[in-house]
Amino acid sequence: MRARAVAEARAWIGTPYVHQAAARAAGCDCLGLIRGIWRALYGAEPEAVPPYTPDWSEPARAEALWAAALRHLCPVAGAPQPGDVLLFRMRAGAVAKHLGLLSAGAPAPRFIHAYAGHGVVESTLSAPWARRVVAAFAFPEETI
């Protein structure tokens, strides 16, 4: 499942960044990328995604993205592997609001994500990015 997830994520590279979108080559945000990978792996998405603002749930201090990941993905114990979904907290004390997919492990870890101003790219999981990772999840072997 992990190798299929990486292959699908790589097919999205170059997709423009569009907030709340989830269409390969047309536009997506970080959640839209993960939604697109889910559809490629399983078909229909597990739940409808309500509208959300770029600040996610920061004003309410609710971990909405983390809660959704826990509903549909499997928490990873130990080091994430290529194909796992990474959840990022962009600022200390802020809610987690960015997602990516680990595409390569050590010694040169990389991840694929949709990033405002850049679209879907494969980036080095450098120290500044790595220290923002707060959780990792695997796609289920079967849909939950």
Image (cartoon, helix red, strand yellow):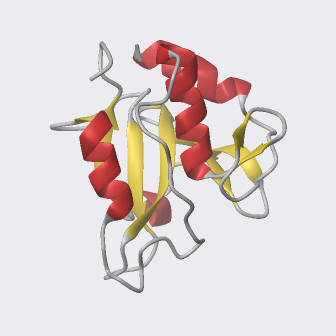
Answer with left or right where residue 20 lies relative to residue 17.
left
Does residue 7 appear anywhere in the picture? yes
- The answer to whether any part of residue 134 appears in the image is no
**Residue at (71%, 44%) from the top-left corner?**
120
* x, y percent for residue 135: 28, 51
Q: Name the residue nearer the viewer: 140 or 125.
A: 140
Task: Give me the residue at 53% from left, 76% from top.
Answer: 55
Q: Image quadrant of residue 53?
A: bottom right
- Farthest bottom residue in view: 59
Q: Is residue 73 above or below residue 5?
A: below
Lateral position of residue 99 relative to residue 19, left or right: left
Q: Position of residue 97 (x, y in %)?
A: 45, 64
Q: Residue at x 55, y 23 (%)?
A: 39
Task: Please name whichever residue, 93 or 73, is drawn nearer the observer in this view of the structure.
Answer: 73
Which quarter of the picture shows residue 72?
Answer: top left
Is residue 60 shown left or right of residue 70?
right
Q: Is residue 76 above or below residue 98?
A: above
Q: Is residue 47 above or below residue 118?
A: above
Farthest residue in the left direction? Answer: 77
Q: Quadrant of the C terminus?
A: top left
User: The N terminus appears in which quarter of the rendering?
Assistant: top left
Q: Is residue 111 left or right of residue 71?
A: right
Residue 65 in the image: x percent, y percent?
A: 38, 57
Q: How many marks?
A: 0
